[in-house]
Image (spheres, rainbow, N blue to C red):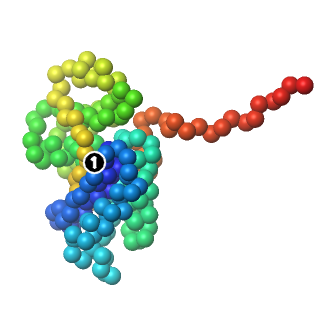
Amino acid sequence: MDTSLGSAVGLIGRDGRTLADVSQTGRLGHAEAIGSLLEQVLAAAPGAGADEDPLTHVASGMGPGPFTGLRIGIAAARAFALGRGVPVVAVPSHHAAALEVIEVDAPAEPFAILTDARRRETAVTVYEGIDVDGIPHAVVDTVLVPQADVDRKLGALRRIEVTAISGAAVARIARRAVAAGRTLTGSEPLYLRPPDARVPAGPKKVGS
């Protein structure tokens, strides 16, 4: 599952083959969409809803992404995994986007994955090929770059602007990480900036 951009849910088989991959675009409505997308995926995959559930892991896209939308997908992934009694595998969302680029184009040079971080900023991660475990190799970790500075910062580096993340690609990254015994990211979402909400300060003292 991934809600770093739109809402996406995918399912792959034990051999890595995509069994179902559905999504809904838009920055809003993640909470309304994620349950319906999950139902569509399970309905499209024979046996996924049976008593002897073949599901072994739930992959959760951890961002970068906006605070509210991202936590909806992560919470849904954790709740679904808890209900099925399977572990959650945390996956950087840009890894999934990079994997799709590599599988389609096989770029020989480094390239940058760009996603809209709002507030006139862009989230950027630079990749170069895949590592021995088949996971995209990030040579520059994800950073926020002002949109006005993207050209200057990236220069001639090839850039791919991503507007959607594939749930199946998130699952493929997770499958390879599990097979290699690797942890790709921590359990905390990659927000890149603190949420707007703040804990209220204590009451001000009133002078006499």
Residue 77 position within the rendered picture, expressed as x and y whole percent measured from the top left: 39, 59
Kindly identify the residue that appears in the image at 43 percent across and 70 percent down: 83
Kindly identify the residue that appears in the image at 30 percent across and 76 percent down: 49
Kindly identify the residue that appears in the image at 69 percent across and 35 percent down: 201
Can residue 23 be seen here?
yes
In the rendered view, tell whether residue 117 sits above or below residue 13: above
Q: Residue furthest top?
A: 152
Which amino acid type is marked by label 1? Thr
Q: Residue furthest right?
A: 208
Residue to which mark 1 is pinned: 25
In the rendered view, tell whether residue 8 sits above or below residue 107: below
Which quadrant: the N terminus?
bottom left
Look at the numbered disc 1 and give the secondary structure of its residue: loop
Bin the neighbour count of mark 1 within 10 Å (Cα to Cα): few under 14, some 14-19, many 20 and up. Answer: some
Work out whether residue 178 or residue 123 is closer to the camera in this orientation and state it.
123
Kindly identify the residue that appears in the image at 17 percent across and 62 percent down: 18
Residue 61 position within the rendered picture, expressed as x and y whole percent measured from the top left: 34, 50
